């Protein structure tokens, strides 16, 4: 079955309830002739950590939002939940879902493995406790976390991560200059990352990827039935198909460290 705006494939996206970054970045990254529909991960829990676990606990019921739409894969645009439920539970739940599904964290794992990257640096928008959980997750997946650069800003805005501007990721990335790693990962699906990657797709020789870039790359590969490949991911990191997006370039200026 084909959908007119999705001649190459249709996928679903599940987005945390207050996240304002996922849909814009998916729209920028999705190649022509693919399309996506969005559902929301919803929780009434009163802390970020409790909501993240709740999203994952109720992941299967969230699929009902797609009803009988012919989605060929689902992207779970939430990274923090993977850290808190742990590797074994993440893998177990993903194996029970009705269509091929990838979390943002698993997409990054697939990307790093395709790149044969073992030593990584992280750019994190999280507070300290979630940073600790994140490092433990990446170590459990077999990676060595060499350095973490924080983009976290305490804020009285509606959400300390989703209210970050485009410069937060770029400034944290700049602070890693000179660190010897195989790859840099920008964590979280709520921190805007595409301007920073477009401006600096490499830190020295190390490719710079984000959870959102990895997630859309991996989901499109799932739709196509393709095995993750380094050359393909590197083309995405270098901006193939998205860096000249009118939505990304409109009213944009060059990212510089410590910009206002």
Image (tube, helix red, strand yellow):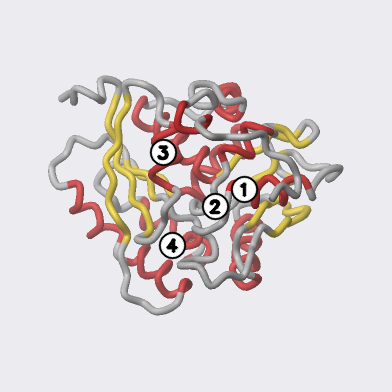
Q: Relative to 150, is 250 above or below?
A: above
- Residue at position x 54%, y 65% from top? 160
Quick one: label 4 or label 1, which is nearer the N terminus? 4
Q: Which mark is residue 186?
A: 1
Vertical side of 43 occupied by 179: above or below: above
Task: Report whether 253 appears left or right of 79.
Answer: right
The kind of secondary structure element at disc 4 is: helix
Name the secondary structure under disc 3: helix
* CB atoms of marks 3 and 1 within 8 Å: no
Q: Residue furthest bottom?
A: 46
* Secondary structure under the numbered disc 1 in the rendered image: strand
User: Going from the N terminus, do you reach mark 1 or mark 2 first?
Assistant: 1
- For marks 4 and 2, give the CA distance: 25 Å
Q: Earlier in the sequence, mark 3 or mark 4?
A: 3
For disc 3, the marked residue is 26
The mark that comes first in sequence, 3 or 1, is 3
As drawn, the label of residue 89 is 4
Nearer mark to the viewer, of 4 and 1: 1
Residue located 68% across and 45% down the image: 170
The residue mark sitting in front, 1 or 2, is: 2
Crowd rating for badge 1 (residues with CA inside 10 Å; few <14, some 14–19, many 20+): many
């Amino acid at each position: 079955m084909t959908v007119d705006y999705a001649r190459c494939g249709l996928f679903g996206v599940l987005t945390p309830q207050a996240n304002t970054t996922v849909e814009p970045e998916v729209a920028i990254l999705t190649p022509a002739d693919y399309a996506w529909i969005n559902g929301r991960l919803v929780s009434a829990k009163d802390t970020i950590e409790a909501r993240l676990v709740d999203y994952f606990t109720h992941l299967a019921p969230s699929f009902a939002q797609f009803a009988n739409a012919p989605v060929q894969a689902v992207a779970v645009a939430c990274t923090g939940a993977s850290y808190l439920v742990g590797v074994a539970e993440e893998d177990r739940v993903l194996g029970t879902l009705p269509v091929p599904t990838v979390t943002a964290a698993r997409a990054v794992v697939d990307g790093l493995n395709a790149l044969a990257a073992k030593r990584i640096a992280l750019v994190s928008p999280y507070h300290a406790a979630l940073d600790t959980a994140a490092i433990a997750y990446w170590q459990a997946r077999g990676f060595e976390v060499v350095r973490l650069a924080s983009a976290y800003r305490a804020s009285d805005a509606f959400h300390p991560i989703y209210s970050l501007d485009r410069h937060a990721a770029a400034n944290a990335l700049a602070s890693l200059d000179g660190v010897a790693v195989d790859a840099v990962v920008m964590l979280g699906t709520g921190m805007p990352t595409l301007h920073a990657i477009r401006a600096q797709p490499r830190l020295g020789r190390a490719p710079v990827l984000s959870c959102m870039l990895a997630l859309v790359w991996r989901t499109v590969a799932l739709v196509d039935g393709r095995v993750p490949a380094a050359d393909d991911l590197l083309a995405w990191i270098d901006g193939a198909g998205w860096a000249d997006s009118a939505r990304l370039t409109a009213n944009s200026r060059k990212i510089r460290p410590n910009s206002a």
